[in-house]
Amino acid sequence: MTRSLSLLGATGSIGASTLDLIRHNRDDWQVEALTANCSAAELAQLAVEFDAKIAVVGDETCLPELREALAGSGVEAAGGAQALCDAAAQSVDMTVAAIVGCAGLAPTMAAVERGGTIALANKEALVSAGDILKKAVDRAGAILLPTDSEHNAIFQCLAGNDIGRVRRIILTASGGPFRTLTGEQLQSVTREQALKHPNWEMGAKITIDSATMMNKGLEFIEAHHLFPVGLDNIEIIVHPQSIVHSMVEYRDRSVLAQLGPSDMRVPIASCLAYPDRMKTPLTPLDLAAIGSLTFEAPNEELFPATRICREAIEAGGAAPAVLNAANEIAVEAFLAGQIGFTRITAVVEETLARYSAAAPGTSEEVLAIDGEARQRARDALESSTLV
Ligand code: NDP
């Protein structure tokens, strides 16, 4: 039976992996909406290839280019923040939420409020507005399928078990490209080095987040929202091979792990086919060739991001949204060559220290906090202590 799908963030890395799976299972899917921010030519090409009903750019100034590229194709073109939410709210069997950053919050919320099934990759939405998003999920009867590889692994390890019997969730982290460096060496790493992840091919923002370990900190918060086992029962362990994608320990000390290639098509396929399984074009895991799987404790002195994230979620209220916004600004500044690598987490910590706000009760309030925190982070970027 053909199922309908909308893909938010179609031109990104998760978007490409999702569309590759659809390409290999073309008869099973009808693509409704594909979205991007401003990659209009690429979006138009994908919309035509996948016979989408509508293509949407978030940045309205890119709409004329999209319209021109789609002229005569029969694919409708739209642009702007409202158009993005309208596309996300369309009735489909599956919405893949793969916009990067807090920019994905409003469209993800629109899909949730419609009561749809959402494959959620956009972790920043959950970090910034976890409680609000979860309440909306319950209210609307929506289904969130965790797409992040670690959370998808946990989701798979929990299947058929009572979450009340879980003793610990163990989130694995590759440790990123700088795991073995000294503090002094970390001071001088370049943008190019940081953009080369040892195991995963991903968008620029999450690749930098992986290098600082902020990604793991954001995932700690994400795990807390998705799997209510208590913050003290979520642990992070470094596993440089990225083969074990996370683990669940039960109260009898039995530990279940999910293994697979370091390829996002595996967790995406698990979401697309859920609760069934679909074929993927991936080569099977060759454990003999991999040889050994190793584990080590994270080094929070060199990589403080996981501590900062733990403190932010313990503080609760607006802190996770402030943290996320500050990190987005700091990563942008690092990618633009404005600050050094170790300044990223310093800017985040500085912003959290300088700005607190009342706990948000709606996603609009989260976005207001996000906007203010971005400004505070820009101020922190310019502060003499951080240059
Ligand atoms: P990319 O940077 O590769 O792609 C981001 C997508 O979002 C693009 O389609 C981009 O459009 C769109 N976009 C960016 N900004 C906006 C905006 N303001 N409004 C509307 N659309 C926007 O990111 P990834 O695919 O790597 O990551 C997407 C999400 O998935 C992130 O939250 C990430 O943390 C999460 N994730 C990613 C993994 C991966 O392997 N890549 C693994 C696990 C989670 P355009 O091309 O026009 O800029």
Image: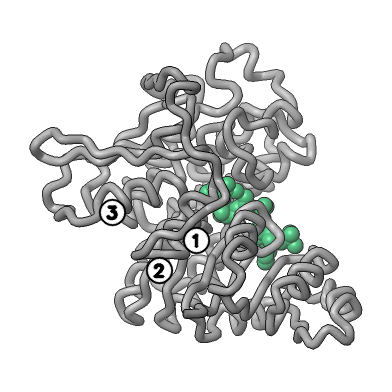
Crowdedness near tag 3: few (<14), some (14–19) or many (≥20) residues, C-alpha within 10 Å: some
C-beta proximity under 8 Å, tags 1 and 3? no
**Is any part of residue 327 visible from this angle?**
yes
Quadrant of the image for the C terminus? top right
**Which comes sooner in the sequence, label 2 or label 3?**
2
Crowdedness near tag 1: few (<14), some (14–19) or many (≥20) residues, C-alpha within 10 Å: many
The residue singled out by tag 1 in the image is 125
Residue at horizontal 88%, vertical 75%? 69
> In which quadrant of the rendered view does residue 193 lie?
top right
- Name which residue type carries label 1: Ala
For the residues labelled 2 and 3, the Cα–Cα distance comes to 14 Å
Task: Judge: label 1 CB < 8 Å from ligand 1.
Answer: yes
* Observer-nearest of 356 and 239: 239
For the residues labelled 2 and 1, the Cα–Cα distance comes to 8 Å
Label at residue 99? none
Residue 52 position, x and y percent, is 69, 79
| Placement of 135 over or under 217, stated as above or below | below
* Observer-nearest of 201 and 296: 201
- Name which residue type carries label 3: Phe
The residue singled out by tag 2 in the image is 133
* Observer-nearest of 277 and 343: 277
Residue at horizontal 28%, vertical 47%? 157
C-beta proximity under 8 Å, tags 2 and 1? yes
- Count the numbered circles shown: 3
| Placement of 387 over or under 249, stated as above or below | above
- Name which residue type carries label 2: Leu
The residue singled out by tag 3 in the image is 227
Residue 293 position, x and y percent, is 40, 22
